[in-house]
Image: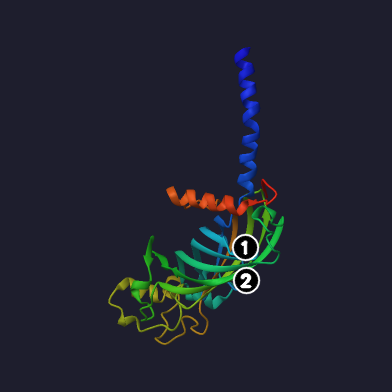
């Protein structure tokens, strides 16, 4: 019984300090967030069906976001997304006769600025339960269009099916809007929609006109440049329109995200962490000339 009594007394003495630790861990300012999300990606280009505004191809992303003040933040993200387009699923009969298709696994690296519609509050835990935001920035994306031929995936860019040698890395301009809700002291849940303006029309490997089939030395390239014979149609003459170079391709990402506020000393180590902790304590308390400390 004596041991039980001592144990209860010890818990009684420790409990206030544990509560204080929990309290102060919340009260410390946190400006840095870790982000993870999943969602869908939708392709816009020559092989897209005009009525498909939301596709079901997957996307995954991770990133970090830093708040400069209660409205403005800078975010960096890495995103994997998949895109796909098929003439065989189009509503247009001429598209079905063209019979082109592609699928691509892509990566995007971007930096965007965010502006909240409502201010966050003096401290991160005082943020509103619901907020809207807009974002815009710049990034780069890597794409690698492929198609299926005789049961195998074939990369299209090396074949130069339109006689053009294009880069598989291109700048993008991401912009869009989002909404988030406060799910706890340190967590947010968000949904975000953003379009990517691209500076290439070869996301799908389709842009200009057909070239002379006899110019290909690779028989696979000759077969994939014009796939009409696969649906019982004759090969078209060189110069026949294959795509539409007037409009660059693009894509739209709909993402559901979890945001977590990291401690401000998350990346600090050793003496740097101790100095940062001391700095935080000094900023959190100020000396009262009449004696003592107050928040």
Residue 126 coordinates in the image, percent (x, y): 69, 54
* Residue 282, position as x, y percentages in the image: 58, 52
Q: Against 233, is 70 above or below?
A: above
Neighbourhood count class around disc 2 (C-alpha, 10 Å): few under 14, some 14–19, many 20 upward = few
Residue 58 shows in this picture:
no
SS class of the residue under badge 2? Answer: loop
Q: Quadrant of the N terminus?
A: top right
Q: What is the count of numbered marks?
A: 2
Q: Is residue 214 left or right of residue 233?
A: left
Q: Position of residue 21 (x, y in %)?
A: 61, 40
Residue, far top:
1
Where does label 1 land, which residue?
Answer: 192
- Mark 2 touches mark 1? (CB < 8 Å): no
| 146 to the left or right of 14 | left
Q: Which quadrant of the figure has residue 115?
A: bottom right
- Furthest residue in direction bottom, as rendered: 239
Whichever of labels 2 and 1 marks the residue nearer the N terminus, that label is 2
Q: For mark 1, give the secondary structure.
A: strand
Residue closest to the eye, 241 or 245 = 245
**In-front residue for pair 172/200:** 172
Q: Which residue is mark 2?
A: 51
Identified at 64% across, 22% down, the residue is 9
- Using the rendered view, name the quadrant where residue 175 is placed: bottom right
At a point 71% along the width and 57% down the height, the residue shown is 128
Q: Spatial distance from mark 2 to mark 1, Cα to Cα? A: 21 Å
Q: Is residue 116 shown above or below 37? A: below
Front residue (pair 57, 211):
57
How crowded is the residue under tag 1: few (<14 C-alpha within 10 Å), some, or many (20+)? many
Look at the picture and state if 210 lies above or below 21.
below
Nearest-to-viewer mark from 2 and 1: 1
Residue 156 vs residue 168, the one in the foreground: 168
Res 107 visible: yes
């Amino acid at each position: 019984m004596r041991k039980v009594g001592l144990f209860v007394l010890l818990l009684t003495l420790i409990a206030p300090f544990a509560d204080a630790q929990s309290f102060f861990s919340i009260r410390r300012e946190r400006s840095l967030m870790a982000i993870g999300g999943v969602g869908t990606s939708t392709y816009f280009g020559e092989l897209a069906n005009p009525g498909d505004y939301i596709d079901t191809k997957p996307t995954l992303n991770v990133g970090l976001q830093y708040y400069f003040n209660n409205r403005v933040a800078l975010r960096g993200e890495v995103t994997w997304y998949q895109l796909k387009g098929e003439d065989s699923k189009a509503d247009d009969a001429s598209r079905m006769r063209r019979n082109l298709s592609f699928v691509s696994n892509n990566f995007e690296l971007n930096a965007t600025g965010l502006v909240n519609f409502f201010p966050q509050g003096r401290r991160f835990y005082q943020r509103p339960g619901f907020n809207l935001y807009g974002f815009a920035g710049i990034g780069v994306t890597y794409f690698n269009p492929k198609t299926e031929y005789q049961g195998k995936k074939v990369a299209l860019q090396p074949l130069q099916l339109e006689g053009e040698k294009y880069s598989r890395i291109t700048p993008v301009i991401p912009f869009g809007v989002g909404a988030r809700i406060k799910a706890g002291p340190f967590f947010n849940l968000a949904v975000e929609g953003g379009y990517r303006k691209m500076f290439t029309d070869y996301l799908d490997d389709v842009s200009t006109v057909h070239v002379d089939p006899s110019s290909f030395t690779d028989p696979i390239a000759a077969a994939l440049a014009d796939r009409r014979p696969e649906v019982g149609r004759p090969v078209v003459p060189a110069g026949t329109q294959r795509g539409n170079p007037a409009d660059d391709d693009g894509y739209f990402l709909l993402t559901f995200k979890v945001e977590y506020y990291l401690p401000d000393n998350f990346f600090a180590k050793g003496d740097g962490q101790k100095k940062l902790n001391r700095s935080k304590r000094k900023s959190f308390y100020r000396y009262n000339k009449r004696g003592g400390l107050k928040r």
